[in-house]
Amino acid sequence: MTDMMLKAEDLHARYGAVEVLRGLDFEVPDGNVVVILGANGAGKTTTLRALCNMCTTTGTVTMEGDDISRAKTADIVRRGVAHVPQGRGTFPELSVMDNLKIGAYTRKDNEVGADVDRWFEIFPRLEERRDQLAGSLSGGEQQMLAVARALMCRPRLLLLDEPSLGLAPLIIEDLFERFAQLNKETGLTMLLVEQNANLALDMADYGYVIESGEIALHGPADQLKNDPAVQEAYLGA
């Protein structure tokens, strides 16, 4: 039986008086890629923020069986959760190398340099620009840097918020190939929020569709891809 990396039960989230999530229940099995689909404003980004306690929440979130519902965001990161936010999330005034080192700030081991070399191998464009300011990189390069920086903390769960947003099709395809490679080779668990439903469902094991802060549909990724309602709303069928 597959162990459960993350489980949310009756998850509500709000910003001030505005309730965005209305009782979500979902699971992310260890080693799997799970995708959350939905229209703009459905609550996808808020779902990832709620898991990291970055907004006001109620309900229960467990990671590997431990309740993290009231944990501080920094403590959730230390437990092995890395969040790549929408809009890259790099430090533009710092170099590529310094961004990567910041990603490892919670670590106490002596293998940070080896991990930098590893991500430079996976994202060779970053090595070419190691001394360049992050703010001067292209959109695709900034997204690569944001992902590599998140991976520098050696997470067990990677949260990805719209990684394809604003990128050229070839860059998107390459980025998703990297994600699939990481999942296959390292077993890294991923929870992916994505507008590009075709690419996301091709890579994912399971998917959830959110509408107005509630889960409207869920199932294995291949099943969702063949669902007429999903095809009409998200796949351009």
Image: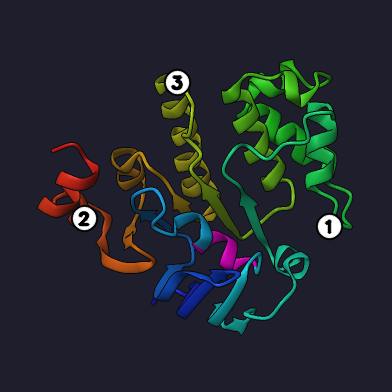
Query: What is the number of the mark on residue 106?
Result: 1
Q: Nearer the viewer, mark 1 or mark 2?
A: 2
| Magenta region, residue range | 47-52
Quadrant location, the N terminus: bottom left
| Amino acid at circle 2 | Leu
From the top left corner, tell me how far across and down residue 114 is, in percent. Answer: 79, 39
Instruction: Give the image quarter of residue 92.
Output: top right
From the top left corner, tell me how far across and down residue 141 is, in percent. Answer: 62, 24
From the top left corner, tell me how far across and down residue 2 is, in percent. Answer: 42, 73
Instruction: Give the image quarter of residue 140.
Output: top right
Confirm whether the magenta stretch covers residue 154. no
Query: What is the number of the mark on residue 168?
Result: 3
Quadrant location, the C terminus: top left
Nearer-N-terminus badge (3/2): 3
Residue nearest the viewer, comparing 31 with 68? 68
Which residue does the image show at 41% across and 45% down from the upper left?
194
196 sits to left or right of 75: left
Tell me the residue that label 2 is attached to: 224
115 sits to left or right of 199: right
Residue nearest the viewer, comparing 112 with 26? 26
